[in-house]
Image (cartoon, grey):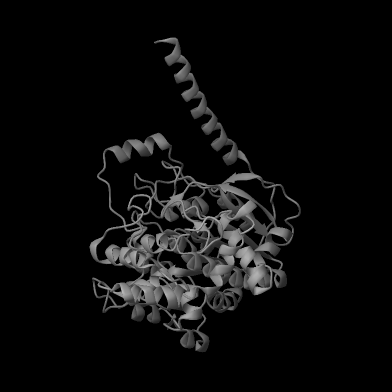
Amino acid sequence: MKRRDLIKAGVVAGAAAALSAQAQSAQANQPGILTRARNLIFFAYDGMGWEDYAIAQFYARRVLGKPLALERFLATGVSGLQNTNSLTSFVTESSAAGNAWSTGVKTVNGGLAIHIDGRKLTPIFALAKQQGKAVGLVSTATITHATPASFVVSNPDRNAEEQVAEQYLEFGAEVYLGGGQRFFDPAVRRDKKDLYAAYAAKGYGVVKNLRELEASNASKLLGVFSSSHIPYEADRRFQGVDTPSLAQMTRAALPRLAASSKGFVLQVEAARIDHANHLNDPAGSLWDILAADEALEVVMNFVDQNPDTLLIIGSDHVCGAPALYGTGSSYREGSAGVLMLENQKGTFEFMLGRLGNNPSPEQVVEIFRTVKGVTLKPEQAQAVVDAITKRVYLPDAVRYGVQPANTLSWVMRQTDARKPDLPNIGWNSGQHTASPTLFGVYGRGIGAARIGLIDNTYNFTLMTRALGIRFQNPVMSEQEALEILKSRAEVPWNHPEDTLALA
């Protein structure tokens, strides 16, 4: 081998060793949080990165006139960063990230609490249930979606949501609140099973809208409030879409769970931040973060009043890598893009549902004007029509693969470098990205623990310690998983396509 090649090989090997050492050091970092708790709440921000937080923080202070509850959390709890890579990919997805949280081990993207060789893992809420604790899941996604499901059941396919709905019935959590009626409704399920009746037969109050939720006095609840995911907060708030907010669902869950004599565990997931970032939709992301903040305030107040409760928050991954970027002379116009979001009164999902399959340019112009507060040029409106009717996408369908929504975002981009004519907010892609994310702990007895950078698998360690559980799930190596993947046909799955809930 030539000397140049030897040097090149050494550089590559050194870089690989550095990456390995970095990952191992994060995994080896075990912050000294030894608090014990009767109750545990895990609050998941799906797909949220620090730029999302910055935009919401500025909007809340400048437009709404109040700081975020998340600001109070970061000021009074302890927080740090967590790595998010899955077993075989630096870019994770929600099931593998959920598995890391709930089982303490890395897995391949795509399955729920299971290794690629079929070995089932035991998730944290199943262990808590063995202790006699009540269990609750609350989500703005379908309640059978990857993040809530990964905390309670094992399944090789995160897309098998009809089967997950049956697994939930067998598992027997006290509260399931979210979207996904189609996985319970006999008129829609492929096997025609009536899971509504099956849950009712096991003592659940079955509710399908906010009025029924507020009127129910059932101690166990199955609440599914939409056919697919819960509609976005911007559409609920400004377009009259009638579904519960995340805060309302959380308020319904907490007293039922708190009635348990042995305590409870609860996951609250702000799921549609991820979906909005897949769509590159600034108002969708902003308002779902603000809705999550209302739910977080409910949870923090509960923890303040019930000091035997531990609250953990985290983001499973970043999505789209959004950014509010500087613009204008010396970036003096950098705030303008956030302030423009006040004029946006709905999401691309809502708009696409209204436009249908064959809109005219005039219809496109009108819905952008009324929903986004934006006046499109004729060529921009035609680009939207072409994306919907001809599948001609902007800027491309590779990095920006959640179409036609990403085209709707692209035509709304800033075009004047001197002063924003449109929001100076951009996305790197329509896909998940690899950045470290938010991690934090709030509750009595935490003290001033140093967090630093952890691996996402540490969440399981923290939760088992807090609940007094001693358990270790089996570990698989990356090489073992890659060997199995080589010999197996790739199984198709529907994320991120399922982020558009147009049905």
Is residue 250 shown left or right of residue 166? right
Q: 370 or 275, which is in the foreground?
A: 370
Q: In which quarter of the image is residue 24?
A: top right
Is residue 140 shown left or right of residue 482? right
- Residue 277 appears in the rendering: yes
**Figure quadrant of the C terminus:** bottom left
Is residue 436 shown left or right of residue 4? right
302 versus 437 height, above or below: below
Where residue 178 sits in the image (x, y, percent)? Answer: 45, 73
- Residue 38 appears in the rendering: no
Seen at 71% across and 67% down, the residue is 307
Where residue 431 sits in the image (x, y, percent)? Answer: 41, 53
Q: 98 or 439, which is in the foreground?
A: 439
Is residue 141 shown left or right of residue 439? left
Where residue 145 sits in the image (x, y, percent)? Answer: 41, 64
Count of numbered badges drawn on the protein: 0
Where residue 202 sits in the image (x, y, percent)? Answer: 41, 78
Q: 190 or 13, which is in the foreground?
A: 13
Q: In which quarter of the image is residue 192?
A: bottom left
27 versus 156 height, above or below: above
456 versus 23 height, above or below: below
**Figure quadrant of the N terminus:** top left
Q: Quadrant of residue 45?
A: bottom right
Seen at 73% across and 60% down, the residue is 76
